[in-house]
Image: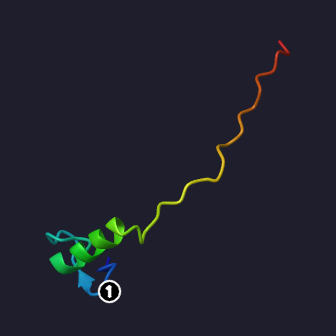
Amino acid sequence: MKFRCPICKKPVKLGDSDFPFCGERCRILDLGAWSAEEYRVSSSASPPEEEEPSDED
């Protein structure tokens, strides 16, 4: 399976010390993007509705 650095798209080998990045530069750039809030983890707009338990016993 071939992997590519998510920042610069260079080929990366599984097991490299900086995986999934090609090197320290790309790893630091990614960390900076997270700290600058350029990336966001999405969440659902509202919690799922819970069903009322029925008393049909």
The N terminus - image quarter: bottom left
Decide: is 56 above or below 48. above
Percent x, y for residue 49?
72, 39
Within-10-Å neighbours for mark 1: few <14, some 14–19, many 20+: few
Q: Secondary structure at mark 1?
A: loop
Question: Could you tell whether 13 is left or right of 33 in the image?
Answer: left
Percent x, y for residue 19?
22, 70
Percent x, y for residue 54?
81, 21
Q: Nearer the viewer, residue 33 or 24?
A: 33
Residue pictured at 14% horizontal, 69% vertical: 17
- Residue denoted by label 1: 9
Q: Nearer the viewer, residue 43 or 23?
A: 43
Residue pictured at 64% horizontal, 43% vertical: 47
Decide: is 12 above or below 14. below
Q: Nearer the viewer, residue 29 or 4?
A: 29
Q: Specify the farthest residue to the top.
A: 57
Amino acid marked by disc 1 = Lys
Decide: is 39 above or below 51. below
